[in-house]
Image (cartoon, grey):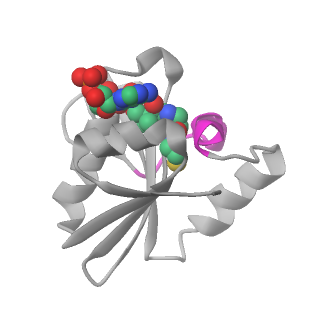
């Protein structure tokens, strides 16, 4: 994925950088909860759930996407962009990256109110969580 200076990367990123971004996408963002997500939800041994980060200018980790993919169906579980880097199209590009890699027949997301507009603009059906 992404051979240029921008792109998605799955490995070789410090866990702390991932946790910092993940915190924006998780309601209960305690250090324990974030560690659990990184190590268990996206454990290397779980092949149906994947986590990628977006690298900007070949160095800064500025976005993240985590999703579940099985038999043509993809569900976005976590998506976050560094607040300083928002509204520059990174959110769109991480989703484009997942589509380019997985070619899902169906792509859905569950989210809170804040991200509904973002998904709607992209054309993804989002169901509201926590209601
Ligand atoms: C949702 C999020 C990932 C969007 O990332 P982003 O990089 O800012 O998104 P993009 O720049 O690709 O936005 C694409 C389009 O979505 C829409 N959009 C994005 N954020 C929006 C917002 N807060 N309100 C309304 N529309 C929004 C806009 O139409 C935008 O296009 P525009 O800037 O040309 O108007 C980011 O706001 C974020 O990290 N939020 C906190 C985490 C979160 O809520 N995650 C979802 C639950 S897991």
Does the magenta segment cover residue 51?
Answer: no
Q: Quadrant of residue 116?
A: top left
Residue depicted at 41% across the width and 52% down the height: 10
- Compared across the picture, whether 108 is left or right of 11 comes to left
Q: Quadrant of the C terminus?
A: bottom right
Residue, far bottom: 71
The question of residue 14 being in magenta is answered with: yes
Q: Which one is nearer the viewer's eye here, 18 or 24?
A: 24
In the foreground, 12 or 107: 107
Image-based side of 123 in relation to 90, left or right? left
Most extreme residue toward the front is: 131
- Residue 50 location, x and y as percent? 44, 63
Q: Label the magenta part by its dominant secondary structure.
A: helix
Q: How many marks?
A: 0
Residue 118's quadrant in the figure?
top left
How far across and down, in percent of the image, does residue 43 sit?
A: 59, 68
- Residue at image point 35% right, 63% down: 108
Q: Which residues are magenta?
A: 10-25
Q: Is residue 108 visible?
A: yes
Left or right of 120 in this view: 51: right
Up the image or down, 42 lies above or below 93; here it is below
Q: Residue at 24% of width from left, 28% of height from top? A: 5
Q: Position of residue 129 (x, y in %)?
A: 57, 57
Establish if 55 lies above or below 39: above
Q: Is residue 71 left or right of residue 13?
A: left
Report x, y in % for residue 79.
Answer: 46, 45
- Observer-nearest residue: 17 or 102? 102
Q: Quadrant of ligand 1?
A: top left
Is residue 89 visible in the rendered image? The answer is: no
Residue appearing at x 61%, y 67% in the figure: 41
């Amino acid at each position: 994925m992404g051979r240029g200076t921008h792109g998605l990367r799955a490995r070789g990123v410090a866990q702390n950088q991932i946790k910092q971004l993940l915190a924006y996408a998780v309601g209960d963002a305690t250090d324990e909860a974030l560690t659990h997500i990184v190590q268990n939800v996206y454990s290397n041994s779980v092949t149906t759930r994947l986590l990628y980060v977006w690298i900007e200018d070949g160095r800064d980790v500025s976005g993240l996407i985590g999703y579940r993919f099985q038999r043509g169906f993809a569900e976005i579980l976590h998506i976050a962009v560094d607040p300083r880097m928002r509204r520059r199209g990174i959110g769109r590009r991480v989703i484009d990256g997942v589509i380019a890699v997985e070619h899902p027949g169906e792509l859905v997301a569950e989210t809170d109110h804040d991200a509904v507009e973002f998904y709607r603009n992209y054309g993804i059906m989002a169901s509201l969580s926590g209601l």
